[in-house]
Amino acid sequence: MTLEALSRPSLVRRLVILAAGWTLAVLLVSAIVLALLFQQAAIRRFDQGLAELIDNLTAGASIDDRGQVIAPALTDLRALRAYSGKYWQIAEPTPQGGIHVLVRSRSLWDSELEAPADIAAQLRSRPGQPVSYDTRDELGKPLRAMATQVKLPNRAAPVIFMAAEDRGPVDRDVRGFITATAVVFVLLGVGMVAAVVIQVRVGLNPLFALRREVASVRRGKAERVVRVYPTELAPLADELNALMAHNQEVVERQRTHVGNLAHALKTPLSVMLTEARQTKGSLAGVVEEQAEAMRQQVDHHLRRARAAARTQGSGERTPVAEVLDELSRTLERIFLDKGVVIDWDAPDDLYFLGERQDLLELAGNAMENAGKWCKAKVRIRTSPISPERFRLSIEDDGPGLTPEEREEVVRRGARLDESAPGSGLGLSIIDELARAYGGSLTLGPSRLGGLLVELDLPRAEA
């Protein structure tokens, strides 16, 4: 696909981008929300374990006769192993706004649980309510900690119970869940985008089919759109059929008018020529000469008008090889006295998108001109330019033309050699008829030494 094609608006691309963008955005938001919910649920479960540990500490703690806090004996072995990742400590607030540790678990060894600088103020403002925060132990492990301030019997000062545990396993679970979720959602996104593409292609398939049918009509392979289309496209198909029928009617009307005009002009000209030929004198000669020129001009313009009308039609397919074979045999007989040999080559599956008469006129004029000026040889080749165009090349071994003469000879009625027979309209007719079909005529030097005539013409599907 070219950059120009990519830059053009596309319904398929627009629908796919919109649907895929919306789908991927929803999946991305869903994945993020799901990961956050899982993380919050995991942290809540983790905090519940810390809350149970603090409840056990609170329920089992006691005050001795000297007012000292005595910690209960806990059975969790991790709290007894140094830096195991599970810690607790009992503290009290200080007048300066900090905390002073009274009792700690053996797992803390000689360290203390780090806490925010304003932890005492937070606990004082929320008596009996837990405060959770994140911190690290002496080994740098990430910890999830919780603290609660309560009043114990037989003690005037409040007591702060603190517990913490390594949150590494929870973080690993969250990362594993996020990774698995990302993989699943990526696969789901790819699948949904593929489904969107398939859905759009299938949904717009009738539109593509309508385009193919219209192209078949334009190439002459069908006369009208015949498929049954969905409700949304049926009116468009009907309108296209109506438009093609109207165009065909206009073309037929143009052909009729052209034919009527031909009869209206040719009859008076024929009468003038007949009378002039039967009358002697210089005036009769002038009338005959001018009437003959007028008839040639009328024939030329009528051919051009008919060609323009035919190119508006539904399209007709003409086999190129058959036309070249017919013309070659005819012209070899015409130029038999010169011994002209016409070497032509064209594939059997090459078709001209137009009427047979027009191809006969296009190729015939060029081949006749080559036969007239060649020494003994004319070569004709065809080559495809694209699926819609092909090139017809006619070259001879005659004297050829200079670049200036090539420009002059295409002008209507121009003749470089007044002694040669003809009206001088041959190449002009070829040029105008080729243009009527959206093609072109190019003149150049032949590899045989003479003139090269190249015709760019419309190609029909085989």
Image (cartoon, helix red, strand yellow):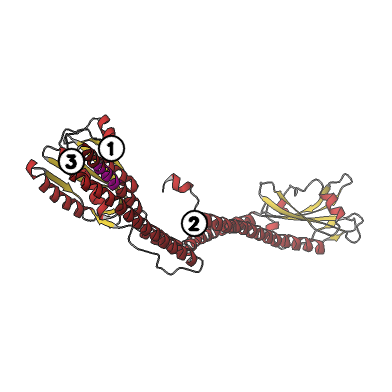
Tell which of 196 and 43 is nearer to you. Answer: 196
Residue segment shown in magenta: 291-300
User: Can you say whether 131 is above or below 371 in the image?
Assistant: below
Tell which of 1 and 174 is nearer to you. Answer: 1
**Quarter of the picture holding the C terminus:** bottom left
Question: Mostly what secondary structure, the magenta segment?
Answer: helix
- From the image, tell me which residue sits under label 1: 410
Cα distance, mark 3 to mark 1? 36 Å
- The residue depicted at 41 percent of the width and 63 percent of the height is 245
144 sits left or right of 213 in the view: right
Crowding near the residue tagged with mark 2, few <14, some 14–19, many ≥20 C-alpha atoms within 10 Å: some
Label 3 is placed on what type of residue? Lys
> Of the residues under marks 3 and 1, which one precedes in the sequence?
3
- From the image, tell me which residue sits under label 2: 12
Cα distance, mark 3 to mark 2? 77 Å
Q: Which of marks 3 and 2 is in front?
A: 3
Label 2 is placed on what type of residue? Val
Label 1 is placed on what type of residue? Val
